[in-house]
Image (cartoon, rainbow, N blue to C red):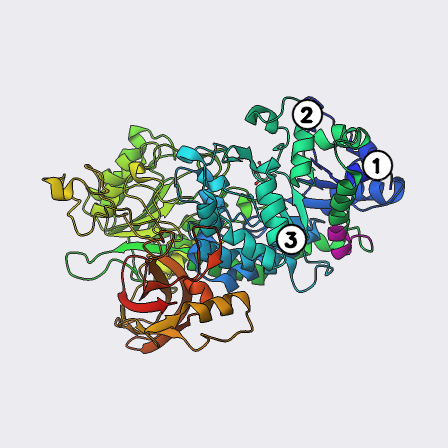
Amino acid sequence: MNLDEKVGQLVQYSSGQPTGPGTGRTDFNDMIQKGEIGAMFNITTAREANAFQRVAMEKSRLQIPLIYGLDIIHGYRTEFPIPLGLAASWDPDLVQRAARVAAREASASGIRWMFSPMIDIARDARWGRMAEGLGEDPYLVSAMARAYVLGYQGERLSAPDSAVACPKHYVGYGAAEGGRDYNSVEISEHTLREFYLPPFHAAVNAGAATIMTAFDSLNGVPTSANPFTIKQILRNEWGFQGLVDSDWTSIAELIPHGIANDPATAARKAFLAGVEMDMVSSFYHDNLANLVRSGQVPETAVDEAVRHVLRVKFALGLFEHPYADEKQEAGAMLQPESLDLARTAAERSFVLLKNSPLAGGSLLLPLPSDAKNVALIGPLADDAAVMLGSWSAQGRPEDVVTLRASLMQKLGADHVHYAKGSDITKALDEQLAEAVKTAQDSDIVILALGENASEMTGEAASRAHLGLPGRQQQLLEAIAATGKPVVLVLFSGRPLTLPWAFEHVPAVLAAWFPGVQAGPALVRTLFGESNPSGKLPVTWPRSVGQEPLYYNALNTGRPAGNADLTKPPSGAADKYISRYIDEQNSPQFPFGYGLTYTNFSYGPTQASSAQLSAKTLNDGLRDARHPPSSDLTASADITNTGTRASEETVQLYVRLEGTSTAQPVRALKGFQRVKLTAGQTQRVSFHLGPDVFALWDDQNKYVVESARAKIWISPDSAHGSEATLDITK
Ligand code: BGC
């Protein structure tokens, strides 16, 4: 390979879009023939993929196949719920199966590289990309990251239906100041290691073959030119052997970031920091070979980067099988089992936020299956496109079954009275009036409100106001004023601050954006054929001013304790504490929260031993074969006290006190889904390995220290009884 051909392997362009700033080339065939492109993306048919591939395989000197990528973050043609919804399932096995479906469909179009999972910890609902990720908690996001990687990459990468994963955005992107997309990020090394890095480490340990850097500058150094995160942590500490890709023009963005004054410097800084492939900016294409020739970049480093690209292509079997089978493509999409899984995934993603008794004492949900006179109101009741969520790859509105279609099928068209009531962002007075009339003439109202997926969630969709857009709040209040029982189905890519709704509406279901099977999943859930069992993967705030709001915070030196924060401070004792004078500290709903159609009671948390040795745990931490604490367990009896069978996600939390660095008030360390029939009790046990008690200390080392450990087995991050253990030297 000559130097230019090597650099070519490190260049990636988006089909159909001009190359980077100032260059504007679209002559991809010519560049591929000259060996100037190694990877492409945004190609979505086998025919197009094969056409470019033919140029690479038949006309370029070295006949190295191209690799095709795409943003497939929750399905390719069969759209599953958005990632935040998938995370709400707390079901990694389900996520792995969904990822497998996505890889099978995408590879049928020639796409073998998924720009996913997005595993940025997101603590601030203003950030639109919260929708694309898996929530706020390192343990849950790590579990989901692993599931995605295993699902995409399958048992063998060389299988024609496997694809390489690309965890992103490395790293800290979700902590954008003020929740404003692309904004700067400040995260101490301690916090980075404790919260933001673990999902990436988990994805690397699961075998992720590639990783994508990010747009943010992290502590003053953009992550697309950050040797500390890429070279030191990813390569040296974790031993990552795969390929590091930039984000879209993130190498060119080093200039506006202010750490390079010209493209050559930007290319040099990114490359020497360890970014191996240049997505779109063309700065490597234009500068890397000259940087080598002038001695500013060692050719051995280019060789190493090229090796990483080629290894991925070899592993995928692209040299032997560079082409997708155009005849098989259509048949791979939307297979019945894939649609079944999409429906199950949607059902498992729903979080029942509220279900209060009506005047007669009975719960509003589930609705009676013989309901005869149901009003369906709201801009999202019949909007197929929005159900697909953001980054919906090849998802098509015509593949979506809406809530309206499914409800009519369930009850018969005559029994469903539909009124749109409002658009997402605007409404006419007549629309509102018609909706009120429709509600008045019905027995029950299902109200489908929320955000627009593509404009209000995802990339470049930060919001400073987290209420219902347009006149939807007005619609909600007008419908509630009719006195009819209202079920609010909320579609969103983030928690919305709706204190009025949570106070006045008897039943609220968070549906996120559920994907192609939105309607069937919702109808089965609303009528009790499927029981909601999702739990929040993010803390649900009461008001925007609380953001960033997350459960695994530090306690502060002046915690609010039991002070009554519903009232303004009345004296020194409840003033000089960490609080707002005009809002509670607590969220609307805590992380991990979600109701079911039954009730669960939790017995006391019990640990099998009250004393642990830090030394033994540290031995176990360093050497997994060391079995020092393998028999230490925490257990609790969980009872289904209601009248219906249901699943429950039982959660394990830990707090460490007396340690060198302050530890979160609670940190999730385990979860299990159990299914209990009415009246059944089951003892749920968690094995407590050394990781449960390990922390990043004041020297940024991962160790177990002597400490007091509190443990909860609980239905969410705010409840449960506590057991205490002593970890002695
Ligand atoms: C996004 C990435 C995405 C890339 C390619 C960027 O704007 O930040 O998440 O993978 O575009 O589409």
Report the front residue among 530 and 411. Answer: 530
Figure quarter occupied by ligand 1 = top right
Q: Is 254 in front, or is 150?
A: 254
**Mark 2, secondary structure of its residue:** helix
- Pointer 2 with pointer 1, Cβ within 8 A: no
Residue 308's place in the image compared with 470, above or below, is below
- In this rendering, position of residue 580 left or right of residue 697: left
Residue 105: % across, % down:
64, 54
Helix, strand or loop at disc 3? loop
Mark count: 3
From this viewpoint, which residue is outermost toward the left? 570
Label 3 C-beta lies within 8 Å of the nearest ligand 1 atom: no
Q: Amino acid at mark 1?
A: Leu
Return the residue at label 1: 3
Q: Residue 607, located in which quarter of the rendered image?
A: bottom left
Is 467 positioned to the left or the right of 50 in the image? left
Alpha carbons under labels 3 and 1: distance apart: 25 Å
Whether residue 134 is visible here, answered yes or no, is no
Magenta residues, start to end: 311-319
Q: Which residue is mark 2?
A: 263
Earlier-in-chain disc, 3 versus 1? 1
Horizontal side, residue 37 vs residue 226: left or right: right
Quadrant of the snapshot with the C terminus: bottom left
Pointer 1 local density, CA inside 10 Å: few below 14, some 14–19, many at least 20: some
- From the viewer's perspective, is residue 2 above or below residue 661? above
Q: Residues within 10 Å of mark 2 (few under 14, many from 20)?
A: many
Q: CA distance from mark 2 to mark 1?
A: 19 Å
